[in-house]
Amino acid sequence: MIPKPASQHPLDGSLAIGEKTPVTFHGVAGSKAAQGFARWLRLWMGWRLPTQEAEDPKPNGVHFSLEGADESLGDEGYELLVAPTGAVVRANGEAGLFYGGQTLACLVREATAGAGGQRSIPAAVVRDEPRFAWRESMLDCCRHMPSVAYIERHLDLMALLKLNRFHWHLTEDQGWRIQIDRYPRLMEVAAYRKAENGAPYGGFYTKDEIRHIVRYAKERCIEVVPEIEMPGHSMAALAAYPELGCTGGPYEVGTKWGIYEDIYCAGNDAVFEFLQGVLEEVLELFPFGWVHIGGDEAPKARWERCPKCQARIRAEGLKDEFELQSWFIRRMEAWLAERGRRLIGWDEIHEGGLPPSATVQWWRGWMKDVAVEAARHGHEIVSTPTSHCYLDYGYEEYSVEHTYGFDPIPEELDAAAAKVLGGGGNMWTEHTPTEAEMDRQIWPRKAAIAECLWTPKEGKSWPDFERRLSGFQGLLKELGVRYGPWV
Ligand code: ACM
Ligand code: ZN
């Protein structure tokens, strides 16, 4: 089982579970957990387990209940008792119940086969809760664009690994991937780049597809964090609406990787009208409390020579282009805050100052001070440093064991520990044109990251993880995941 539960104690005896085992839940919150449990067993064992609402457990059944759980378990923790007379999951919230069901599904999978196709699960008590509340998986769907079915399977695996934030990177220099009705040229122009063979490459997720993904995620206790990049990584949008850049273009949707100097003009009010128009539609699609505005890698060359940007610097009494960036991000932060949403951005958003309510996603592993400074200024931190969390990096420098060494609170961040919400794994797709290549980079390393986010630090052990990982390999194989090197 991955991630390893916080505590697990064997009891005497075992419980037989089979395709006739009744699965009951108390209250609607339990329905998600029961479905999530039954789905895996249908896939793995071919069982169609009957699930129904019931106040009390049925003999030899599986029961999910929001009553009687220890309050100290929080919203995501759970207690699972497997006794010879039945299994019961207790939790304080929907997510806790759901994770108890995922754990029980794994126990069934790992159990030895008994009479009549049943599985015999050793009796045990599991008491489990996450080390971190924010456990994300980030996927760049811009450089290359995976299908909706691929994202669904990604969410299935995230749920099994108890990851709870899908960070969906939707806009880039090389392609805009989200339908926005108010700005049709985003779909007509920004969504496509010229591929090496001259043909258009790209596309976008429709609003119906996005609503589907958000719902699919929610059924698995995953919140979707949309990322709309600003002020940099915006060539695709500029190609569609060149008046939003400092020079006015012409621009083309990026065909090379790397960092482009053309970014949104911070001196032009039309840029804010555009971005806020986009975000209005984004907020309708994504109900989660946080919106990611990117904010990384925004070169200042254009702003330095742009009369409008320079006029803004003077009018707002700013010191330089870094303060202009900060002014830009603050303006978006205030706009989001008025609508009850919180801003998260890559760690550059901290340059030049930022209101403490903004969350900073630390990525520049070589700049530890950034995260410590941001925490000192009151920001919450999501930790995804290049040292361990960049799954697009090769396995030679970044083995599974290396990835397993990730700690969202490295020693250098001790002073900031209380502000670290969690972390995750980032998958940038410049060099993975196919889903098979994406799979190879992500798996099995994402499983290592998941354990680093869930399991207590003192419970982690590489040899033990490596052993459990071999069971996970079979699971990936059954799902058709074209995983990468194992060691
Ligand atoms: C990043 O890797 N540019 C956030
Ligand atoms: Zn400008």
Image (cartoon, rainbow, N blue to C red):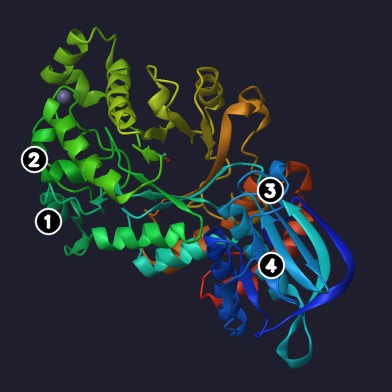
Q: Going from the N terminus, do you reach mark 3 or mark 2 first? A: 3
* In the displayed structure image, the side of residue 189 where residue 134 appears, left or right: right
Q: Is residue 434 above or below residue 362?
A: below
Q: Please tell me which residue lies in front, 206 or 247.
A: 206
Instruction: State the separation of the CA atoms marked 3 and 4.
Output: 24 Å
- The quarter of the picture where residue 484 lies is bottom right
| Comparing labels 3 and 2, the label whose residue is closer to the camera | 3
* Image disc number at residue 56: 4
- Badge 4, how many Cα within 10 Å: few under 14, some, many 20+? few
Question: What residue is shown with label 1?
Answer: 188
The residue shown at (24%, 7%) is 317
Counting other residues with Cα less than 10 Å from the Cα at mark 3, is it few (<14), some (14-19), or many (20 or more)?
A: many
How far apart in space, not on screen, are marks 3 and 2 (Cα)? 53 Å
Distance from label 2 to label 1 (Cα)? 16 Å
- Residue type marked 2: Pro
Quarter of the picture containing the C terminus is bottom right
- Of badges 3 and 1, the one in the foreground is 3
- Is 339 on the left-hand or right-hand side of 54? left
> Which residue is under mark 3?
129
In percent of width and height, residue 318 lies at 27, 10
| Res. 239 image quadrant | top left
Mark in front: 4 vs 2: 4
Q: Quadrant of the N terminus?
A: bottom right
Check disc 2 and report the residue beneath it. 250
Residue 406 percent coordinates (x, y): 64, 43
Evaluate whether residue 486 shows in this view. Answer: no
